[in-house]
Amino acid sequence: MSYLGISIREALDKINAPNAGWYLPQVQRQYVWGARHESETYICLLLDSLLKRYPIGGIVLWETEQKVPYRRFIGDYTPGQYAKQVDEGLWGAAKLLVYDGQQRLQTLYSVLRHRFNDRVLHFDLLFDQGASEADETGFLFRNTNAASEPRHLRMTELSCLRCNESEYIALEDRVLPAAENDQERKILVRQNLKALWDIFVDTNHKSIAYFSVRADTPGEVNEVFRRLNTGGVALTQLELVLGKIKAVYSDYEERLWALSEKIKNASGIEFSSTSVLQFFHLLAKDTIRIDESRLENADIPIFESILRNESEPLVELFSGYLRGLLNVNHASIVPRWLAILPLAAYLTIRKRHGHEWRIRALSAPELQLIHQYFLLSQFCDWNTQTMVNAFAREAMASAEGGHRFPLAKVRQLAVEKNRTGDLHEYQLLSQPWLATKVLIPHRSYVFHENKPQVDHIFPVNLDGADEAYQQAVDVLWNFQPMPAEVNNYKRARHPKEFFQSDDGSKYWASYDLIPLADPGSCTQSDASLWTDHLAFIEYRKQRMLDELARLYGLSIAKPAVTQTAGAATA
């Protein structure tokens, strides 16, 4: 069978239609175009291609009445929105499952019938194609509550109109005021409106080519799907593995999403469903390096068992350890997420073999080794796939017998992989968000657009400060987690003046590891700490390093002593 044609209007009407509608098979990856940082530009170019009658690629469908799980297309798209599986009672209905073309169809469905990131697609009817650059289009996204303007035609309104002359004339009368009685503009508006109508309303122009696959079993059509994805944007190994699992456990991905959401609700940290699956792969296959060809049918029930019975320790790592003990409340604080997987594996295997696995029930020596591994793995960059696999094997072997986390063996492995096994000052300075957090664990960050709000105790923009001062105070040892309203309040005020003032003294208790007495009552020997920023920073650096030793039993390595040329000669 050859490809057939269908208009944009007809295709949109088929999506999620109750009778022989177009839906998504479970094996499909999730919608990814919306996650692009340039998604609006990319979408406008897709719509512009349709308007110019360029081909946008074909759609491949499996027409079936077999009882197989499938999903609805998303209506209003927002980041993190997933296509949901329909109720099992509908699985046997007549349907066409989209095996190739999901990204294009989902985009068209959201922007022509719904909203995209709470914004609405419009077309500027005064857009002049002849006077524009090659990559410019008349399409643009506007906020949902933006004021209506005749020149900006809502594409959701256009795509829902009936294809008859009276509808067209009424629409033309409504938008012509955009031309403001300018004859050339009237021509432009009419030309643009006619072009839009022909593509997005009129059903005579078949803009989309589609092909129906005839197959008796999901296995046959899945093979078509695999071959289609050998070109273009191929499925990742993780997506292929997930597809195999979903072929047996159709709701597996939904339950991964639910576990990811549970972690976020319990800790405030986003740990994606794909990251969860990678961790399960570590438990099931002894590696985080995913290769779909090595996933046997016998492995699939193991993945199901892990999700069903062994997800609690992963949640515990986030809620009981990262959030519970360290007050880590956002994913951006932790730079190396692969490195936490050996800890999750360690807790999981302890639980599997009947040993205590809850963080607050572990002894102080057990907890200290976990602390030390976490900090060293983050600051020393123990984060490659090979290292994480090796660490996890050692951790799981120790966990089987209920032994402590094998930090000594892990550190030795790290050194063998050309990573340092010691903590250095430059490593703390290079990760100031994490360092500040773990050195002051009882404080929580307040975030704005994925960035923690941090106060410089000696402010960077102090009146009259020179560049040398600014560089000296913009350092970890001068950081304090603090909401922006306080930070802005004292932005350019000297801390000595601020803490002695009536309005600033009330914030004294919100600061940590500073001289015990406020600037107004400190001894003469401590007075320089509030007048000399270098003395203050050196003092607070030592206080923070003392906390590193007290809380975690760690200290920074002393710099190697380099001999001068003269000393070496002597």
Image (cartoon, rainbow, N blue to C red):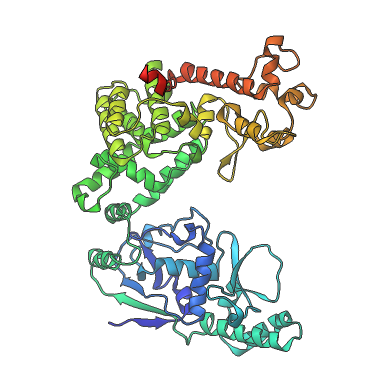
Name the spot of residue 372 as percent of width and height, x first: 40, 24
Front-most of 378 and 492?
492
Q: Nearer the viewer, residue 339 or 425?
A: 425
Name the quadrant of the N terminus.
bottom left
Residue depicted at x 55% and y 44%: 450
Residue shown at the point (77%, 21%) measured from the top left:
500
User: Residue 406's spot in the image, x, y percent?
Assistant: 30, 24
Residue 390 rendering spot, x and y as whole percentages: 26, 34
Total marks shown come to 0
Q: Can you see residue 561?
A: no
Q: Percent position (x, y) of residue 273?
A: 40, 47
Q: Residue furthest right?
A: 502
Q: Is residue 257 left or right of residue 521?
A: left
- The C terminus lies in quadrant: top left
Residue 407 showing in the rendered view:
yes
Residue 224's place in the image compared with 3, above or below, is above
- Residue 236 image-quadrant placement: bottom left
**Residue 155 as seen in the image, left or right of residue 29:** right
Q: Quadrant of residue 143?
A: bottom right
Is residue 11 placed above or below 362 in the rendered structure?
A: below
Residue 515 lies, with reference to residue 243, above or below; the image says: above
**As drawn, is 151 to the left or to the right of 559?**
right
Vertical placement of 308 versus 215: above or below? above
